[in-house]
Image (tube, grey):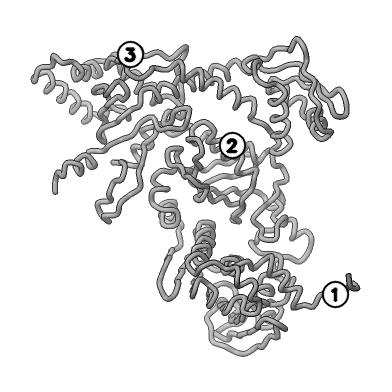
Amino acid sequence: MTRIALLSQRLANQIAAGEVVERPASVVKELLENCIDAGANRIDIDIEQGGTKLIRIRDNGSGIDKEDLGLALSRHATSKIANLDDLENIASLGFRGEALASICSVSRLELVSNSKNDPGENAWRVEAEGQEMNTALSPASHPQGTTVEVRDLFFNTPARKKFLRTEKTEFARLEEVVKRLALSRFDVAFSLRHNQRSIHHLQTAVTEQEQQRRVALVCGPAFIENAIHIDIEASGLRLWGWVSLPTFSRSQADLQYFYVNGRIIRDKLVTHAVKQAYQDVLFHGRHPAFVLYLELQPALVDVNVHPTKHEVRFRDGRLVHDFLFRALHKALAGVRPEDRLATTPGAVENSVDRETGEMLAPISATSMGEFSGQGRMSLSPSAYGASSHSNAYGAFASPNNTGAQIAEQLQTYKELAEDEEIPPLGFALAQLHGIYILAQNKQGLVVVDMHAAHERITYEHMKQAVANEGIRAQPLLVPVSIAVSQAEADCAEQEAQALLDLGLAVERVASESILVRQVPVILSSANIEQLVRDVLADVREHGSSERVSNYQDELLSTMACHGSVRANRQLTIPEMNALLRDMERTERSGQCNHGRPTWVLQSIDQLDKLFLRGQ
């Protein structure tokens, strides 16, 4: 080891560049954040060779004063914070003052700016290049705002350049950065060009319809067609945006955008809350899609916990977690068939847009509502099933129908359609192979998986019954002693009441030992020691635990599965209609307990296309 010495300014900047400038996408992120912080409402981005040859970004923001241009390229120089109070209430995207200095230490950088404080087009240019980073100031012509050109990235650090991927890959990552910021600021217009070719041209979006159009352009039309818009406020927190229906899931977590006060983040607490909200409606191994915005006071969140600012720390993590979970859980449970059919008329798999001719992504219509039944769900005719309407449709299942009777039923359906009395899932026509129910609604043909649908109805009913009774607990004849760490024992002692609310009576008996005296009745046969360890781990990590309810739900789900109608059971038309009506009243009835869809819609338009009608 040699003597301790101060690093040179150039080496310090290049070390900082290792944290800030990983690839061209990192440069674009830092520069775009500066544009937005400067108040720009239009940003133009020109890229060549994936960003390694040229990155040019122009904005119409407030600009930089002539006296500050040279200082702007210095390390730890910023106009966004001045004291500790500013650091605790950060409202800007950037604040470290390292971006420009780090970028110009590994590239050839030119910055031209016209400040709003300098009337006219009296702009100034400052140039800097790696190594010693000597700056040169000269006059230039430029409208109000700033243009930054970054050329020959990593020209003086070949080892870093060697680790870059292909031009296509680097541009894809750079484009993703632009998409993320475009979703965070609807009031800013973005233009992206690559090798002289226009890639994105996004206008400002003020109304909700315009915002949905931008989301569709960035995330794809299939996402917005299969998403629900939410806007919920509580406890000083506001959550708004779009979440996908459970049937529109992804094999990867590649369509998940979460913003805190306009800053995109990836946080374990947020991920856990979203996962819990989709707990029993998402198919195993699949991931939900969402574009969500959380707004709260800047003082309640610390964004200065990671060099790239991708992670944050909430002052009250448990409050945020519970708010996110309840908001999303309520939103997903509140969607009804009529809501989906109203927003996606003619929604079918592989449908084609009549105006553009473009193929749309598969759409599975789903239904979720509020369960209002009492007692064990049965397949006896409900109000609709016992009515003359459903009895009329029962004639379709009879082999003894005459032509006159069928014509009479069709006329009855036509009259109901004119009076708008047909329910969202329509009326049953027949049963297919003892597995599927075929029903007719206004849009076309509804196909229902009767076992999956009845399984969800039974499951939700059982959950409601358990919730109304509360968690019933029973004392253990022989208390279970568990050896734990001191941190786990501290957690058990501090959260004793919270654990008791879950039906677990846990007592600390030594510095590294606890005693379990009471467990939920429904989980009395479970592995008590493993259950308690998992609960304590969740409480320490997320401030709360859903382990008990999850174990309970798994058991109820299994019971519901075994207690539902099985394949090849013949149902009468009134029984089928009773099942359809219960689906319209039941929460999350668009998916079975395992996340599979329970019903899909084939519209008349799609059926016409299958048979080439009108062509």
Q: Which of 183 and 205 lies nearest the eye of the viewer?
A: 183
Q: Amino acid at mark 3?
A: Pro
Q: Amino acid at mark 1?
A: Leu
How crowded pointer 2 is (Cα within 10 Å; few <14, some 14-19, many 20+) is rated as: some
Q: Is residue 164 above or below residue 502?
A: below
Q: Is residue 375 left or right of residue 577?
A: right
N-terminal of the pair, mark 2 or mark 1, is 1
Quadrant in which the N terminus is drawn? bottom right
Asked whether the beta carbons under mark 2 and mark 1 sit within 8 Å of each other, the answer is: no
Residue receiving disc 1: 6
Q: Amino acid at mark 2?
A: Phe
**Quadrant assignment, res 481:** top right
Q: Point out the residue furthest to the right here.
A: 3
Q: Is residue 516 left or right of residue 279?
A: right
Residue receiving disc 2: 325
Q: Is residue 92 above or below residue 66?
A: above
| Label 1 – label 3 distance at C-alpha | 84 Å
Asked whether the beta carbons under mark 2 and mark 3 sit within 8 Å of each other, the answer is: no
Asked whether the beta carbons under mark 1 and mark 3 sit within 8 Å of each other, the answer is: no
Q: Is residue 339 left or right of residue 434?
A: right
Mark 1 vs mark 3: give the one in front: 1
**Quadrant assignment, res 601:** top left
Q: Residue at x 50, y 64 (%)?
A: 169
Residue receiving disc 3: 381
